[in-house]
Image (cartoon, rainbow, N blue to C red):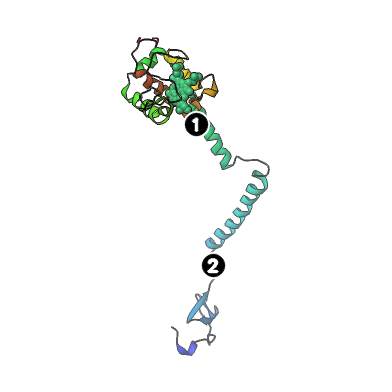
Amino acid sequence: MSTEANQGQPNAHPSTKSEMEGPVLRPHIFDGIQEYDQRLPNWWLWTLYIAIIWTFISWIWEFQLSRPLNMATTDHQRVDTEVAAVKKQQADNMLKILNTLDDSRFWAMSQDKELIARGQMTFDTICAACHAKDMSATMPGGVKLPGLPLNDKEWQYGAKPMDIFKVVSKGSPDASKGMIAWEPQFGGVKVAEVVAYILSTHQRGDGDIAQ
Ligand code: HEC
């Protein structure tokens, strides 16, 4: 929007430093816009210089030294170390819990409503496929399922709570039978919960389940 006289023409009277104090106007006009010819402020220039220097230093460090020569731990390595530490902590906690397990602890757990509710959830979703929800290992139509009944008083691999815990966590000694080790699948705590649930359907001192 400049005056018609100036349109497309170099400024007839360009201001120069000698002529006036203050910013110098550059001679050209584009789309009616004129530019000042000003020196960039020092703070701006130094920000640029330092950014350039910093980029160079960090390029040397990151790509010439630290990565090729393994001089610093990468984010990946740091995450791996953290994850390993958390896993170890979890395994230690698990061991602590599992080390305190014994037959009478299991009977106590079988009275814990919340705990056996969690155990039942695991049982109904996973174990029931072979042992049936009512633990009879039989379908309503009378069809036999592959698992052994868990609601009777016969225990092929021992009648103590710890024996049951062992067969569920480690699986059947005869792998070909189809009862796999469940501990690697969902951890010792869940196995303990599901065993407590099985026990909750029996009486302590009832029949074959030993005290
Ligand atoms: C794929 C089928 C299948 C699934 C799923 C399965 N089992 Fe079994 N289970 C079996 C078979 C088969 C046996 C008998 C193994 C043998 O005779 O060696 C068995 C045996 C057992 C026994 C030993 C019974 C005894 O008389 O000593 C227990 C306890 C048991 N299962 C609990 C579980 C629990 C708890 C789950 C769920 C976490 C589960 N099973 C999931 C097939 C299965």
Identify the mark nearer the N-term, 1 or 2.
Answer: 2
**Which three-letter amino acid code belongs to the residue tagged 2?**
Leu
Residue 62 position, x and y percent, is 63, 47
Near-viewer residue (152 or 60): 152
Q: Give the left or right position of residue 124, taking residue 178 as reference.
A: left
Q: Is residue 24 above or below residue 150?
A: below
Total tally of numbered discs in the picture: 2
Q: Which residue is mark 1?
A: 86
Near-viewer residue (168 or 8): 168
Residue 63 position, x and y percent, is 65, 49
Q: Is residue 59 above or below residue 101?
A: below
- Label 1: state its secondary structure: helix
Based on the displayed image, in which of its 4 quarters is residue 206 positioned? Answer: top left
Q: Give the left or right position of residue 36, taking residue 102 as reference.
A: right
Of the 4 image quadrants, the one containing the N terminus is bottom left
Residue 151 position, x and y percent, is 37, 18
- Label 2: state its secondary structure: loop
Res 72 seen here: yes
Which mark is drawn over residue 190?
A: none
Distance between the Cα atoms at labels 1 and 2? 53 Å
Q: Which residue is mark 2?
A: 40
Label 1 Cα neighbours within 10 Å, binned few <14 / some 14-19 / many ≥20: few
**Which three-letter amino acid code belongs to the residue tagged 1?**
Val
Disc 1 under 8 Å from ligand 1? The reply is no
Q: Is residue 151 above or below residue 126?
A: above
